[in-house]
Amino acid sequence: MLVKMLNNTYDNLTSTVKKAVYEWIVRLYINTTADPKVTGQANTYRFWITADVLRLMDRFLLQAPLSTLSGMVTQNPTPLYDVFSSADNHFSFFYDLKQAQADVLYAGLRNACRCDFTSPGNISRLGQLACFYPENSSPLQAPAMDALFKLLNNCRSNVRHIYEDVLSKVNVAGYNATQLSRLSAAVVGLSEAQLTSLNASAVKGALDTFAQNADLSGSQKEALLSSVSEGIIQEGNLGSLGLLASHLSSDTLMGINASEFRKAFQSPCFARSIEGMEPVQKKAILLSILKSTNLSEALSFIPPSLISVVPCTDLRALGNFSSNWTNAFPWNKAQAIVVMEKVFSSLKTTNDFRALLHAVRGLTCTQIQSMTKSQLEAVSASPFLSRDQVRCASASYYRKLKTPDNMTEAKLKNTPPSFLVYAQSFAATVNNIPRLLCSSVVDLLARASPALLTRNSPRRAEILSYIMACYNATNASGLSLQQINSLGGAACFLGQEDIGALSAAQFREAADQLSDCGEPEPSVKTALLEKITAVYGDVPHWRAATLMQLRSLVMLFDLRFLYKLPVSVELKEGLALLLPQRRAPGGFVPEKLHFAYDSSSVSQLYAKMVLRLAAVDTMFKRDICSKVPTTLQIKAIGNGNSILTPAQLECLDTNTFQASLEVLASVPGFSPLQLAALKTVALKAFPEPADEDIAALKRITLAFTSNDVSQSITMISIDTLSSIGQYRDWLNNLRVAKEILAIFLKDNPVNTLTSRQLIGLKYFLCAFTADQVKQLSAEEYSAAAREIGQLECPAEVLLALQEKAVEAYGDPSLWTKDEMDTVGTVTASLNSTQISSISAGTLSYITPEAISLIPSSVFRVRAGPALLGGSVQC
């Protein structure tokens, strides 16, 4: 009865409790079934696991070691088959089942019943085992597919590869709309070739199935759109494309009128599709709408994600700015400045300020200084405040607070943690707070984001010193486990000596918090690596549980150490959980504010595990193409494909290459030699590449030579340039970039380029000559200035763009704060005289990317302190 109750609360139990319950069951049954006359029987798992025990344990079986599972499935008769054959849902709730466990259970069932798991009856009993359905050489019949796909809908892991394997053996060319609709979520398993083979009327009839699926890849969407988009748009049913619309070309989008867009935006899926569009596509939609609709009206119906391409000049020109728009859109910084100019005077109550979302980015220091203490408290928790805004707000807050020595517990609870961290004089501020409240001050500091401070900020040591004094400790070794746990984000301020002084128990307690700190200073990194080895042992002795305890700290080790980790299914699964789930945000980040871990070593180690377990030699250097990864393996290891040698990549057959192109074309870690190998395969796969083929190659085009361009590219669209032009690496191959650009400019003269095209050019704009930049329309440049301002072009191009910015906005001394932010890297070409003519308040809005490009001679004249906004200390 108790075990049944515990099973009902399984999902709410910690991993430690789950393990303890399992071990309690083991002790209970070993004690009651052991025969003392049989030597060693009490220490084996072989005799105690019966079918009844399996039913009783239910999900707690998953806490058993693999050796126990292996022993159980080799029993004759096996209790596993007894349970499997007598119940349809025994495995239905095994949500934390892992691949290694599933492999053992499948092997046990095959041995017991010779099951091939292709019959609907056997498949329907699999439950969560279906989430690890093994590859089959023969195709499944429709009833078996239906049974399997129904179970896959309940999986929490990625089962795309199962859909792909099952459907790869199915001829779908003759499928009608009903059959396609029945596939439901499984449509993600259809290859591009299969989708292209579908009848257009069948796709159209099953359009909802495709249009609502967020997991379709870009190539799958393009294959579907190629057969139905033209007819659907002509019929006025744009919205029915749903999420597929994210891959409509900008030329197509330019041809759709405002009323059609307005109607389409009422479809939630179509509105969501805008989020996945490139800026060139978003600009096309906006320009098309504004042909017949003014911006004021457009703001009443466009999706929030479209706002990013609205120029600040257009926002400023709006006569009436509705208060409803303030929090309706994800304004960028420049836009937010304009918005706050329009609405700040109407913000009165603390609720007004607390409700601010992205618009808070536009608060200037002058505006912040005019806010009351309660208003400052109201905005303090916003994740959109910049460090400079927090610094300004902190100074203003403590000026208004006036009497920290009269601080009470209640008042202290209202103090924003970030304001305390950025107090102008930290020591003076905290020393004025009664000593009795120091633990409450520590709680505040623990809640502040450590990323507010640069990695080498002296404030980190100040905060740590105060915490140690509060806890009467001379260093970290004097802290209790409870005190270490209470450090929160302040654990990130532990220095080299503090890390070294921690005991094993203390470090285990702090590991979770330290894992969230991000990339540390070199000295702290060294101390962490030494401590991890001392506490958890050398890398070859680590287990999956070690990886789960260390989490992101594993990424501190470089590949030569991590390669010592033994190859096993359990460790592979542990590494999979450490891989980043989202792409790191782009853009320039100053080194001392760069906290993102470098996950490349873990990605490559995971790739090694996947390939070694599949008997693919990762040290392959021969010309014999006998062991190369499959499409499924390439997709599984993602960015870890950078582990493959150029020889391996060149050995890929064209079918594998095309099926896995979406992954291979976007791996950031490929070297020039690896890209060149992939290019060789690409030109075999696409001997006469169409425009969309070039677009799909993305990063691989960086390996193109002049000869490749002349033979493979006869025309190129702005969407394709946008796809392949996103890489800064083109600066290292400007000659080829100029040749590709010249093909585009043959049909699109420089003086006719629109803001949409300027946005779409991306790094190909850096291949312009100064004379070509001069030919650009100042008006079109202004409408694309923000996107252009994110490019790190050569100095001569930036200078020409700066002259264009002067033409558009006037003399730099007259530029507004939002214009300074908008022109971005173009400000890096300003000379010392121009820099000196700009007010300090406006100059503080120069972007970090621009600061990184400013010549030191110009930077020293006046810009240093002004550009840093007083941030030297923090």
Image: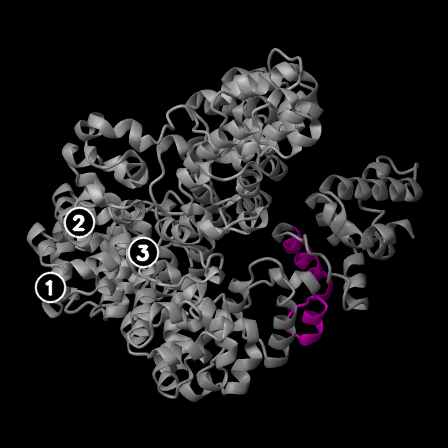
| Spatial CA span between label 2 and label 3 | 15 Å
Look at label 1 and name its amino acid.
Asn
- Closer-to-camera residue (783/48): 783
Q: What stretch is highlighted in magenta?
A: 101-126
Q: Mark 3 points at which residue?
A: 312
Q: Do the residues labelled 1 and 2 touch (CB within 8 Å)?
A: no
> Where in the figure is residue 743, as x and y percent of width and height?
12, 64
> Where in the figure is residue 528, as x and y percent of width and height?
52, 24
- Closer-to-camera residue (663/396): 396
Mark 1 or mark 3, which is nearer the start of the sequence?
Answer: 3
Mark 3 or mark 2, which is nearer the start of the sequence?
Answer: 3
Q: Are marks 3 and 1 in contact (CB under 8 Å)?
A: no
Q: Is residue 326 magenta?
A: no
Q: Is residue 123 magenta?
A: yes
| Spatial CA span between label 1 and label 2 | 21 Å
Q: Mark 1 points at which residue?
A: 751
